[in-house]
Amino acid sequence: MTNITIAWMALPFFIGFIIYLLPKLDRFLVLGVVFISADYALYIFSDPFPVNIQLLDSFGVSLTIDQLSGFFIITNAIVTAAVIFYCWDRQKTAFFYMQVTILHGSVNASFICADFISLYVALEVISIASFLLIAYPRSDRSIWVGLRYLFVSNTAMLFYLVGAVLVYQTHHSFNFIGLQGAPSEAIALIFLGLLVKGGIFVSGLWLPLTHSESESPVSAILSGVVVKAGVFPLVRCALILEEIDPIVRFFGVSTALLGVCFAVFEKDTKRMLAFHTISQLGFVLAAPVVGGFYALTHGLVKSALFLITGVLPSRNFKELQQHPIDNQIWVALAIASFSISGFPLLSGFGAKVLTSKNLFPWQDIAMNIAAVGTAISFAKFIFLPHQKNQEKIKVNFGFWWAMALLLGGLIVANAVYYEAYSIKNIIKPLITIAIGWLAYLYIFKKLAIKLPRAIEELDHLIGFMSLILILLFWIAWTQLPRAIIP
C-alpha cells in the first residue's frame, strides 16, 4: 500500500509536466490521472481498515488513508473529470490542463496528510495552482482577484506555520495528534490558517469575490474541492481529539448561518453560489463524523451549479426572471437545486438526514434555520421561468457529459445512506423545503436589499484574521481541558 500511495501521489505532478511535451494529449492525460484517483478511492472503500504510513522517521511525513479520505478523493476525481469534459471543446491550452493536473494531485495529497508540515506543503502548492487558474484569462481583473486570493492565503499560512513549529517544539513531532498537549497559541494559529484556507466563518469572506469572478470551470473546482483542502484537516483533527470536536462544530454552525444569511439576499447567481459554499462547508464541520459524505454531495452539486451558470444568459436573477431559460438547462439546474435543498431521491437528502442525526442538541435550531435558508436560496433557481427553446441550444456537448457525470453521481451516491428513507425522515425535509419556498415567493422575492461589500475588501479580510485569532486563542485557553494546556 505504501508504494502504491507514493506512486499515486507523484503521478499527477509527473503527468503535469509531460503535458507540456505532449500538448495534443493534454485532456486525455488529465482524464487518465483522474480515473486512477477514482480507482484509488474505490480501493480505499473496499478496505474498512485505515492505513497509516510513516515515511522517513518519526518526525517525517505521516499519511492516513481511510474512508474519510476516500470520500474527499472521489469528490476530487469526479469534479475534475466533469471540468475536463466541460472544457473539452473550449480551446484551453496545455498550460491550463497542466495546472488542473497539479491542483488535482496537491488536493489529493492534502486529503491523506496526517502531519502539519506535509499539509503545509500541499496547501501552498494548491494556492499557487489555484492562483494560476484564476488568473488564466490574463485580464487585469482576473490577475488582481488571483493576487488577492494568493495574498490572503499566504498570510494565513504564515500563522499556520508558526503554530506548526510550536507543536513541534512541544512534542518533537508535526503529527496531528500533537495538538493534544500543545500550547493554546499553537491551536489558535493552526486553526486560523485552516479556517481561512477552508473559507470558514468570517475568515472565508475572501471566497465570494474569488469564486464569482473566476471562469465557471475554475469556480467549479474551487468550490467543489479546493476549499475542502482546508476543511478536511479540521474534520480529521475533530475525529482524532474529542477536545477539538466542539470547537469545529461551533465554527460549523456559525459558518452555516453566516453563509446562508448572505446567500438569501444575493442577486448575482455566482455570488449566491459562493456564499452558499461557505454555508455548506459549515454543514461539513457541524457533524465531523459524517463530514465526508456531505462533502461528496456538496462537491457534486456546487460544481454542477457553477458550470450551469456559465451557460445561463445572465448572472443577474432579475434579468433571468424576465427571459425564460431553455427547459433542458432548467432541468439540470432544478435537479442540482433539489439535491442541495435536501429533496428525496438525490444524495443531498441522505447527507442532510445523516448530518442531522449526528448533531448535538445545541446545534439543532441553528442548523434547521440554515436548512430553510438553503431552500430559500435555491428557490431562486427552481422558480426561474423556462420554456422550450425554438432555436438550437448553443451549449457544447462536453457540458452535457459533465452534467451526466455530476448529476448522475448525485443519484448513485443516494445509495450511500439508503436507511434515510423512512416516513419521518422524508417528511421533515419536505416541510423545510416548503417553508423555504413559501418564504421566497411571499417575502424574499419581493425584497430589494443590497448587501454591503466593504467587508470583502483586502484590508478588512486581514483585520478579520486578527479578530478570529483572538477568538480562537480565547476558546483554546478557556474551553479546552487542562490536559491539553500545559
Image (spheres, rainbow, N blue to C red):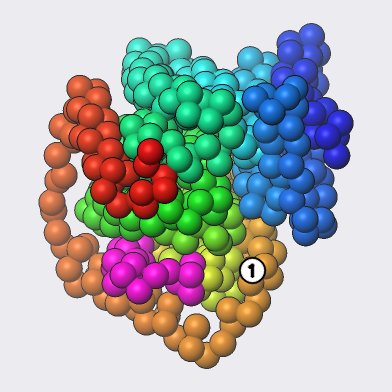
Query: In the image, residue 29 lies at what x, y percent?
Result: 79, 26
Disc 1 residue type? Answer: Asn
| Most foreground residue, 91 or 12 | 12
- Count of marks, rendered view: 1
Q: Is residue 189 shown to the viewer in this render? A: yes
- Which residue is under mark 1? 414
Region in magenta: 355-377
Say which residue appears at 43% left-offset and 25% top-offset. 166
Q: Residue extending furthest top?
A: 21
Quadrant of the drawing holding the N terminus: top right
Answer whether residue 365 is magenta in the image. yes
Instruction: Name above or below for residue 478 compared with residue 186.
Output: below
Say which residue appears at 77% left-offset and 59% top-offset. 48
Instruction: Name above or below for residue 157 compared with residue 35.
Output: above
Local crowd size for mark 1, using a 10 Å CA cut-off: few (<14), some (14–19), many (≥20): many
Instruction: Name above or below for residue 69 compared with residue 411.
Output: above
Horizontal placement of 443 versus 189: left or right?
A: left
Quadrant of the drawing holding the C terminus: top left
Query: In the image, residue 153 lies at what x, y percent?
Result: 40, 24
